Image (spheres, helix red, strand yellow):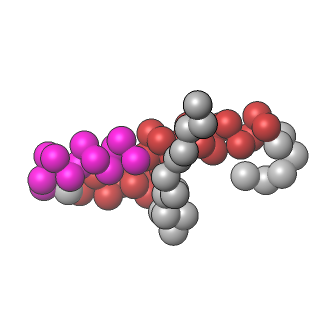
Amino acid sequence: MERKGIIIRSDFNAQQLRGLASHCRDGNQARRLLSLAAVHAADAQSRNKEYPNSGF
């Protein structure tokens, strides 16, 4: 069974998403932003492992 992913916008990195979440007054939106930050960070780590000298 093939897994299909979603495309995450690349104009914000994980650190920026965490910063936006810290200034957000809506708890639900802050949780969503933190979740996206975690996914974005994990994606960056997996790319670094797959292509160690690529600059991702």
Q: Residue furthest left?
A: 26
How many marks the image carries: the answer is 0
In the displayed image of the protein, which residue is found farthest to the front? 1
The answer to if 29 sits in the magenta stretch is yes
Q: In this image, 37 relative to 20: left or right?
A: right
Q: Is residue 27 visible?
A: yes
**For the magenta stretch, what is the residue range?**
25-36
- Residue at 79% of width from left, 53% of height from top? 55
Q: Residue 50 lies in what quarter of the image? A: top right
Counting from the top left corner in percent of width and height, residue 43 is at 59, 42
In this orientation, does residue 22 appear? no
Front residue of 36 and 21 = 36
On screen, residue 36 versus residue 51, left or right, reads left
Residue 48 in magenta?
A: no
The front one of 6 and 44 is 6
In which quadrant is the N terminus drawn? top right
Identify which residue is drawn at 13% across, 55% down: 25
Residue 52 image offset from top left, x and y in percent:
83, 40
Furthest residue in direction bottom, as rendered: 11
> In the image, residue 20 lies at what x, y percent?
32, 58
Q: Main secondary structure of the magenta part?
A: helix
Q: Give the quarter of the image for residue 49.
A: top right
Query: Is 43 located above or below residue 15 in the figure?
Result: above
* Vertical comparison of 38 with 12: above or below: above
Q: Nearer the viewer, residue 30 or 9?
A: 9
Q: Residue at x 49, y 57 (%)?
A: 8
Most distant residue in the top direction: 1
